[in-house]
Image (cartoon, grey):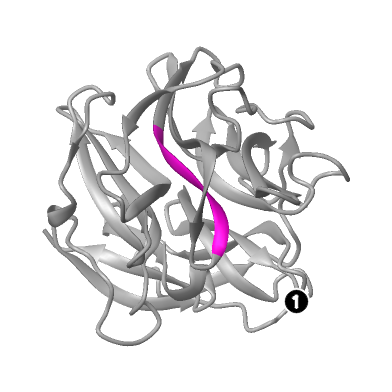
Amino acid sequence: MTWEKLGVIFNTDGRQGWMQSHPYLPTAIQIDQSTIRVFLAFRDEENVGRLGFVDVAASDPRRVIRVSERPALDIGVPGAFDDNGVSPLSVVRDGSRLRMYYAGWQLTPRARYLLLTGLAFSDDNGETFTRHQLTPVLERSSEELLVRSGAAIIKDGNIWKAWYAAGSSIIAADSKLVPTYYVAYAESTDGIVWPKHGNPVIIPQDSDEYGFGRPHVEKSRSEYRMWYSIRTHSKIYRIGFATSPDGIQWTRRDDKVGIDVSPSGWDSEMIGFASIVENEHGRFMFYNGNDYGKTGVGAARWLS
């Protein structure tokens, strides 16, 4: 694969109180023939994230059409799993509704934070979302104690399939204590009730790797494809690529991903959190660069 970088397509520049910085975790879906809606988490001045969106032209994502004026999904009630931030993970069209699987952030004094997955529904193409419940649909368990998040979820026939970050351990990285996690796989008949734990399908390969950020998964006729974010001590985040005949047994092909950090500029230190949309104009990847989105969200076009 070869991706042509199109540069930064949006940054916040402190334009609103809830949208001060870090347009983070792009999660894209085409909402009509001319528009791709890119859902993002935006941080306020206290680094609390709320879910909003940026609409871009389906023919050229460098052309911004609209930016949400208010959160499409706000933080949860005090004490809930998402009371310190919400971040988009997977948006799935289910009939006339959109399902948004999102990460809920909850701070703890010893583990720093817990990351679990919630579900919200939209009947207006993502202008607003309503929570399915106040608790996660991917709830913590003895096997996956700290992280059950970063989920890529698709509906495959009558089965809902999730590839998500799962972990129960903490390590020291970049002078901080952070969770370490692998990619797990789970299935559900309704996308709401999930097993208490998944099966590990991609795990760190060496001592440098310690986590995998939110993947993008798609299914073609012959295989599943996954673009995921490799979290390491030495390189922060890089985008990796893997293929699978069944969505369970994966072969890593990181050398084939066709995109890396730039020699300089907004994505010269890290790239991650790929979200891909394909339409009549081509295949577009949305992703974050340096400092976990502080430098904005960018796009790339697939060339071959």
Given residues 221 and 228, the one toward you in this image is 228
Please state if 116 lies on the left or on the right of 82 as rendered: left
Q: Quadrant of residue 216?
A: top left
The residue lying toward the viewer, choosing from 108 and 253, is 108
Amino acid type at circle 1 is Gln
Query: For the point 13% across and 54% down, which residue is it?
Result: 256
In percent of width and height, residue 221 lies at 18, 27
Which one is nearer the viewer's eye here, 234 or 304? 234
Residue 291 spot, x, y in % from top left: 49, 73
Instruction: Report the label total.
Output: 1
Which residue is label 1 attached to?
A: 16
Q: Quadrant of the C terminus?
A: bottom left
- Residue at left offset 51%, top offset 12%: 189
Q: Looking at this rendering, what residue extends furthest in the right direction? A: 78
Where residue 170 sits in the image (x, y, percent)?
54, 46
- Which residue is found at the position 40% from the left and 63% from the top? 287
The correct choice, above or below, for 99 with respect to 143 in the image is below
Q: Which residues are drawn in magenta?
A: 176-183
Neighbours of disc 1 within 10 Å: few (<14), some (14-19), many (20+): few
Asked whether residue 140 is in view, the answer is yes
Examine the structure image and report whether residue 78 is included in the region drawn in magenta. no
Q: Main secondary structure of the magenta part?
A: strand
Q: In the image, is residue 262 above or below residue 128? A: below
Q: Any magenta on residue 179?
A: yes
